[in-house]
Image (cartoon, rainbow, N blue to C red):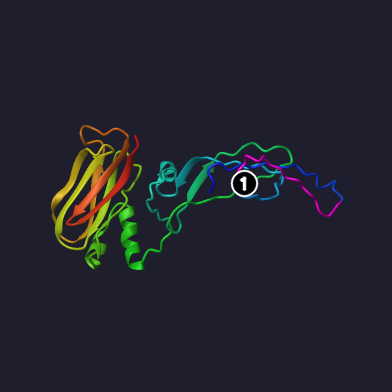
Amino acid sequence: ARKNMSYVWVPVDVQNHKETNIDIGIAWTGTAKLDYIELSNKLNLDYTLHESELISAEHSQDGDVTSLLQNSDGNMVELNPQEWVDLIFTAPPLSEGMNRSFIFVSRGRYVTIPEEKKETLTLAQKGGLNESVRSEKLPVSYELFDNHPNPFNPITKISYTIPEPNFVSLKIFDVLGREIATLVAEYQDAGYKTVEFSGVSTNGGLPSGVYFYKLQAGSFVSVRKMLLAK
């Protein structure tokens, strides 16, 4: 692409022009450096474009998730069957005789979750893993899930899986990288784990803001983000 592209629109009265072909003369000064010339039509259409802003987003089970949708953090979110999100956007007033149409664009990453992993993932996102799932089979990989709820106030749950006995460390950090709390620092058996974190009991009460939780087990390290919203 050229660094400084320029466009010059030449108005042509097509409707009143009776000839089949239209000759347009184009001239430029000798000092101009010409890359190429492209001819195209500019149509004056009777509609206007307006990019609406998201006012609120209400999840059928998790409540207000507006801040999550406005934050492009790359985290994957699964919308399960029988769940929905009510979205409210801004919209300009309509002029007389005009109609309104909407185009909804979803930006994100879509993946297929294996059936054997779906149950574990869903239970972890909902804040816990029951004993029946624990006893059926052990996890096959290390996983650190999104905390639930998120945003939270003041308590949230963090779930993770470890496929083999190992020393596990789970710590909370602020945006400056300072350690806020240590939730787990012990040797654990393989299985499905859930830990509760409270923003009230930590350091006399944490202020609202973004925090990070880091899971380390052997060579496995994973970090995720959470939001405390008071």
Point 60% across, 44% down: residue = 33
As drawn, 96 above or below 218: above
As drawn, 60 above or below 204: below
Q: In the rendered image, which residue does mark 1 sit on?
A: 34
Point 62% across, 50% down: residue = 36
Q: Position of residue 117 (x, y in %)?
A: 32, 64
Q: Which residues are magenta?
A: 19-33
* Label 1: which secondary element: loop
User: Is residue 225 shown left or right of residue 162?
Assistant: right
Quadrant of residue 210 within the rendered picture: top left
Q: Position of residue 87 (x, y in %)?
A: 51, 45
As rendered, which of 43 and 141 lies closer to the eye?
Answer: 43
As drawn, 228 above or below 127: above
State yes or no: residue 132 in magenta. Answer: no
As rendered, which of 69 and 86 lies closer to the eye?
Answer: 69
| Amino acid type shown at disc 1 | Leu
Point 32% across, 36% down: residue = 209
User: Is residue 229 shown left or right of residue 222?
Assistant: right
Quadrant, the C terminus = top left
State yes or no: residue 20 in magenta. Answer: yes
